[in-house]
Image: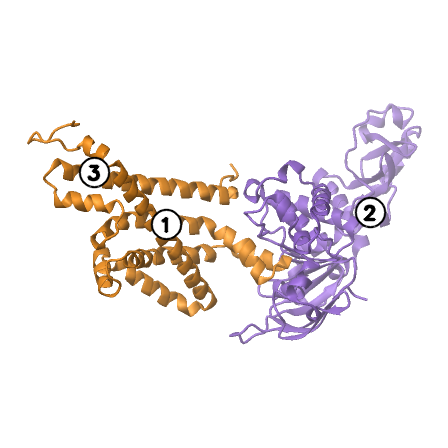
Chain colours: A orange, B purple
Amino acid sequence: MTLFAQASNQPIIVWDWIGRNLGNIWDKTLEHIVLTVIAVVVGSIISVALTFIALRWHRTYQPITWVTGLLYTIPSLALFMLLVPYTGLSMLTTEIGLVLYTLLILVRNMVTGLDEVPIEVLDAANGMGYTPRQRFFRVEVPLALPVIVSGVRLETVTVIGLVTVTSLIGLGGLGFFILRGLQTFSSPIGTTQIFVGTALSIVLAVAFDLGLVAVERVLTPWQRRKAG
Amino acid sequence: MPMIDLRGVTKRFPGTTQDAVGDLSLSVDEGGIVVLVGPSGCGKTTTLRMINRLIEPTAGEIDVAGRPIGSLPAHELRRTIGYVIQQIGLFPHRTIAQNIATVPSLIGWDNQRIEERVHELTDLVAIERSMLDRYPSELSGGQRQRVGVARALAADPPVLLMDEPFGAVDPIVREHLQRELLDLQSRLHKTIVFVTHDIDEAILIGDRVAILNTGGVLEQYATPAELLASPVNQFVSDFLGKDRGIKRLSLLPLSNAVLDPGPSVQRTDDPHAAYAAMAEDGVDWVLVLSGESILGLTRRGSLSDVASVGDAVLEPFTTRVDASETFREALDSIISSNSRYTAVCDGERLMGMLTAASISGQIAP
């Protein structure tokens, strides 16, 4: 059964193939989600630590952004290939690569978000008698949340895209189908696989982004109500 | 014993060659409002912020309520001192109720006590309770400033520090807020240190005013009336402005005024009495009274055919001020009505009259 045909009268999407491979598609989608979530969570934890260092010792902020920025500029394919000799074709390699890409955006947004807390709000918090720790957790972090969450959104969408590339070194979630499809590009099954991998990857990215927007709205109720 | 006592306080910021505040000694009595005023760079805000240890002095001692401010941790000291700033600094992520409850929450009041206190304060500073669940961004500037004051008063601190609190609102709202503060203070009797660059605000708000010069040098510390009557030097006199005499008028209540009967007659008097009164004061009209209430004025030309003054054509006499007002309102009524006299009344009762000349005669220092 075909949707429509190419000039050579071959179908582009082979729906039967999708029907036959639902189990596999589901597995790869789950794998994609797991790879993404691990990378985002681990990346966030490391970024919190780096942000803490950058805020505590201000001179470290520039070097941290240089290094994370440099990592960000390395072509993803090259980075994964560089890691393979050390960590092999493993999930660890995949995650190291993904996590390294998250750091720049997250650290920058965390530091910026905390830096942008209005000075008069900090002054008032000090004047009211907050201890530095209370001020940080009750005032600065909540107010930095919108910027931090936007960093997490950007990072998540980036990782979902990058996971497809990691299929080249083993685990790649939906990238598996794209890679397979490219290897048999001329066949209808090939184009179908590329279509499935790409479409579901986009759907995942959109779904995660919308989910995070919802989380942000719950966490920052004051953002929704501005004076008219 | 003063509530706040600064002795030889000096602040020099790192990397500067001049003191921001130099050897400043100042004491503030309990229940009084002291205004620190001066040009920018006079160290008034620095001085204020040293009292709650947002800035640590380089030298000198500060006591609040008889205790050195260093005798307890800074954050605990600050919970006992209300703090209001020009930019207000409400917490944008907290509702109005949560903002007001900041210090009570920090010092561990239970929820019911906090809620009662928040309601009490919203009534006190005239915020509607419907605002309590809103966020600061949903309020106007004036409302936010009221919330800022309520937040500072929440845990009932004996001392309130206010750093140009009304500097960012428009003049009409500012005047409202100034009056509200004075009204509030007449009920609460806090010890307030208030910083402003506006000498008129200083004179209106302060029980005492400290005029500071560049480098935190105290030029004069006196009541507003003393300052205006006898500035100690050129700097103070320049800072008070060329209209210092007019400003003084607003501090002098009419209740102390020496009043003149002015050109006035009873309505039963005959026209000759009216002519005599006019001649005595050099005017061509006379105020017609019934007992002590003003019926109106009549002019020389209206008196030719009448038996008593009360039968003449009367015009309304509107140049009057209430005895509860100040010399400034009296002078203003004279200037704006183009009349030589203003009538000082206690309700409907005429107390007497004032001229511009008699006003200036009474205010000479």
Tell me if residue A228 can be seen: yes
Instruction: Give the structural element (helix, strand or loop) at label 3.
Output: helix
Residue linked to disc 2: B254
Label 3–label 1 contact, CB within 8 A: no
Image position of B126 (left or right of A53): right
Q: Between marks 2 and 1, how big is the CA–CA gap? A: 78 Å
Q: Between marks 2 and 3, how big is the CA–CA gap? A: 91 Å
Image position of B265 (left or right of A140): right
For marks 2 and 3, give the one nearer the viewer. 3
Residue A37 is tagged as 1
Q: Mark 1 lies on which chain?
A: A
The spot of residue B24 in percent (x, y) is 68, 71
Q: Earlier along the polypeptide chain: callout 3 or callout 1? A: 1
Amino acid type of disc 2? Leu
Q: Which residue is drawn at 42% across and 58% down?
A: A45
Q: Residue at x 23, y 32 (%)?
A: A19
Image position of A121 (left or right of A100): right
Residue linked to disc 3: A195
Q: Mark 3 lies on which chain?
A: A
Label 1 environment density (alpha carbons within 10 Å; few <14, some 14–19, many ≥20)? some
